[in-house]
Amino acid sequence: MTYDITIVGAGVVGTAIARALSRYDLNVALLDAANDVGQGTSKANTAILHTGFDAKPGTLESRLVRRGYQLLADYAARTGIPLERTGAVLVAWTEEELANLPALQDKAVANGYENCQRLTAEEVYAAVPDLGPGALGGLSVPDESIICPWTPSIAYATEAVDNGATLLLEHEVRAVDVHPGGTTTLHTTQGPVTTRWLINAAGLGADVLDRALGHDRFTVTPRRGELLVFDKLARPLVNKIVLPVPSKLGKGVLVSPTVYGNVMLGPTAEDLDDKTATGTSEGGFEFLRTKGEKLMPVLFEEEVTTAYAGLRAAIDHGDYLIDTDPDQRYLLVGGIRSTGLTSSMAIAEHVESLLQDAGLTMTAKVEVADPPLMPNIGEHAPRPYERGDLIAQDPAFGEIVCFCERVTAGEIRDALTATVPAVDRAGVSKRTRATNGRCQGFYCGANVDACITKHLQGAPR
């Protein structure tokens, strides 16, 4: 079979593109080396829905983040993706940072965001009472939000598959051949995949795939960010995102609530050579402890539940690198940094426009699937174990398997049998939060694994 379009990379950007293109009369394939969607840079990030107030004005990133913010917020409301509009406070700790705040406010206005307000030190402490001493002033960003970073990729992929797209996981691309007759063959670990158009949304591997097609225009540097997650007892201390004044490496170390009821501190920013280096480090912990104890010392009176690290796909280019090569029938979506979660749907919209400009015939399907209703794994709405109506219909939703996160057997079963199913414990954790709580699977891990094994033994071969 020859696909009309094949997207390499099933992260939040690749799945968003697949969702968008699946709404046309096109044979679409979504391909990834991992065994699940959203397993690369999309898996571990700061989970913030950005307004784009501090983006570089006039850039493609600025435009797509602003557009993506609204698109994803609307999509979250329709699908049940956990989202909370907490707002953020940007805190100046030095005279130099304080002096930079007016320029940041001007930048926000230039980016089309006019809701920032300057704050005195007293107003900063009124907004975040448990902040450490020494804040000189701040800037409020009332529309910054926290969001579940895992569910969007799964929702996008689910909708794409519901619309007929083919999901090809565990297909690592080893080589590419562009044929003069108008097709391209991807040589994968599961065999060849032939396509008429290729979209490179491979994240950390986008530069490698780009070179395989004969280009040499950018290099991806994996930028590791380590984060600490504090116990839910810390949540009353942090009801807003607390941001530092940005530096050239990004937004720096922040403190933020999560939609799961925890508090998060991080990330670090460490450029590496290894695109698989997602382990945490003693140095990263010490750096975050030093920063965190100044930012909010009382936070360290609570327990750290876990630490994790993610990689951002930083590139030697000041903007998103999205470009079309009609001769090769190839479209690059590279350099999508930490704002990619926010801008994902706008990037997909932009890709649609570029493909149409390149001459691809795109006829909208007469009927498309409704956006899927995703399981709620956030704390903003009742969870299944709290819903008597759901338990009355299906007692499995009253059977707790993971007691830290109150995850039920019904949720785990549904995760294993969904349109885009979990295939292992990591996949179940992303879809239900099982093993992500205080015990980190120490008590519930065996029971979660038993649910998975029971399902696999009963699943059709």
Image (cartoon, grey):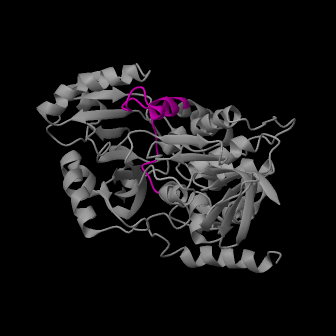
Q: Give whichever of 229, 25 is nearer the camera.
A: 25
Q: Position of residue 223 (x, y in %)?
A: 36, 56
In this picture, is 42 found above or below 325? Answer: below
Identify the image quadrant of residue 307.
bottom left
First to last magenta residue range: 43-67
Q: Position of residue 430 (x, y in %)?
A: 57, 60
Q: Which image quadrant for residue 451?
A: bottom right
Closest to the observer: 453 or 404?
Answer: 453
Residue 57 on the magenta span = yes
Q: Tell me if 440 is positioned left or right of 251 in this view.
A: right
What is the quadrant of residue 70 in the picture?
top right
Tally of numbered discs: 0
Q: Position of residue 222 (x, y in %)?
A: 39, 58
Q: What residue is drawn where x is 51% and y is 52%?
A: 215
Residue 12 located left or right of residue 302: right
Q: Quadrant of the N terminus?
A: bottom right
Residue occupying the far right of the picture = 366
Position of 239 relative to 390 (above/below): above
Residue depicted at 73% across the width and 77% down the height: 456
Q: Is residue 258 above or below residue 98?
A: below
Q: Nearer the viewer, residue 269 or 222?
A: 222
Q: Position of residue 453 (x, y in %)?
A: 69, 79
The reply to whether residue 64 is visible in this rendering is yes
The rendered magenta stretch, by its main secondary structure, is classed as: loop
Does residue 387 appear in this view? no
Q: Nearer the viewer, residue 417 or 297?
A: 417
